[in-house]
Amino acid sequence: MMSHSLLPLGLLVYVWTRPWCAAAARPAGNELLDDVFLRPEERGLCLQIQYPRAGAAGPSELSQLQTGDQVQSQNFSPDSQNHNIPCADPHGGTSEDLQTVVESRPPVISHKPATKTRKKLSPIQETSVEASSVTSLGGCSPLEEGWDQGEDQDQEEGQAPGGGAVDPCDPDVRRRLLELCDVTSSPDLHSECHPLPAVEEHSCLQLGGELYHTYSRVLDGGSFSVYKGAKEDDYVFIKVDSCSVPWDFHQFQRLKMSSSSGDGLPLISCFLFLDGCITVYTTPPDHMFTELTECVPSEVLVGRKAVGVLQLVSQLHSCRLLHAALQPHLLTCCHRGFLSSDWLFPVDWSSSVDLDLQPGVTSVQQVPSAQTYISLGLLEPSAPPQLVDLVGVAETVHLLLTNRRMVTIKDKGGWTAEKFSGEEPCVLFFRMWGRFFRSLLNAGGRSTLSVLSELKEELSTLYH
């Protein structure tokens, strides 16, 4: 005897009723028949599921599929993503401040077409794609293994099934990625089995058997704070983060190991707690820390600091890292003396991306911190993700030069900083700074390493 029914997912289920084996005996008395654990000589119901072949869906199945597609297209309509985002002036100029923080942004929709052939990924790439794809879904159960090839392709491209882009800065994504790197095996990372200690200004902090003195809070990022302090004769910066993923530790280690002059960068240690982590940057012997915005009274000194910023971003891009949120107050100088070369490093990596671990990030549209630049028209959504750091360099140097935030305008030569858009040959190096900002804001298809190298060489010649 056979019966069948149509499940909501469009699967035909056939239930075959087979007679008991002649040798099977029914249970005696009031003993209930066990429908799950049968005796070896017994046979129960057989459940067979038939998947519909491509193009063979029945009318009711097609209507269900079409209804689902319509709902999905309504939920992820590109038009619905553009609310509350500042727009560029239709005449080319902008009145929006580039450093305006967008507290809440809608999910970004990737319009990259799916390819037909499945790309061969390395084990690290496969795991990173899996980590990215399951974050917004809360995990994937074995019952969802029947996804079609199109949804598989979405995962390979770093998208959530349904078309929505996955935030590469999501803590759960990062936690899964760091499992690939075995970060916890580092001798400079320590696990603590209790909550974060209280950290205050002008106080003391015990970490790993060492006593740290905290002087002042130099940065308040909402979910994290950065303090200036000391340990014995060494200067320190202490970042207290409410997120327990040691992303800053990983990114800084990547930068330092790939740098040809890593000895000029500070030492780093990280302490993981149940509800957050503390990252400590310590000066190398005979070095000191100064904030990037300290002691910039002359254009010559600004020029030298600009060379340091260009050098930092070149090192980041050489090892396939994006900082994606360059600002003067996030950058610190590490140096031996006031006349020695500065080694810049960020004290916060919250917006950064590791392109080796996150190969699905292929455009600025997928970088959350780049959305303001895209809405202003400075960056095309499909532009390489590295371009967000070039705009960050321009903003940082502009603030050092003028002590004012950068306002951009677009003229026949492309984008530039408004203050350096005219022709004023009487001002020292005015034209040079004009070329500087135009090169950063109109990189186009050029390699960012090439742009950074050319600007660094030009500035080094003028401000050696």
Image (cartoon, rainbow, N blue to C red):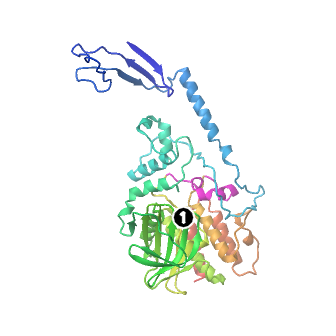
Looking at the image, residue 373 lies above or below residue 424? above
For disc 1, the neighbor class at 10 Å (few under 14, some 14 to 19, many from 20) is many
Residue 191 at what x, y percent from top left?
A: 39, 64
Question: In which quadrant is the C terminus drawn?
Answer: bottom right
Disc 1 residue type (three-letter): His
Residue 155 at what x, y percent from top left?
A: 48, 44
Q: Nearer the viewer, residue 416 or 372?
A: 372
The residue under label 1 is: 323
Q: Residue at x 49, y 23 (%)?
A: 56
Looking at the image, residue 123 lies above or below residue 54? below
Question: In which quadrant is the N terminus drawn?
Answer: top left
For label 1, the SS is: loop
Q: Residue at x 63, y 82 (%)?
A: 296
Residue 306 at what x, y percent from top left?
A: 60, 76
Start-end of magenta stretch = 360-381
Left or right of 373, for residue 40: left
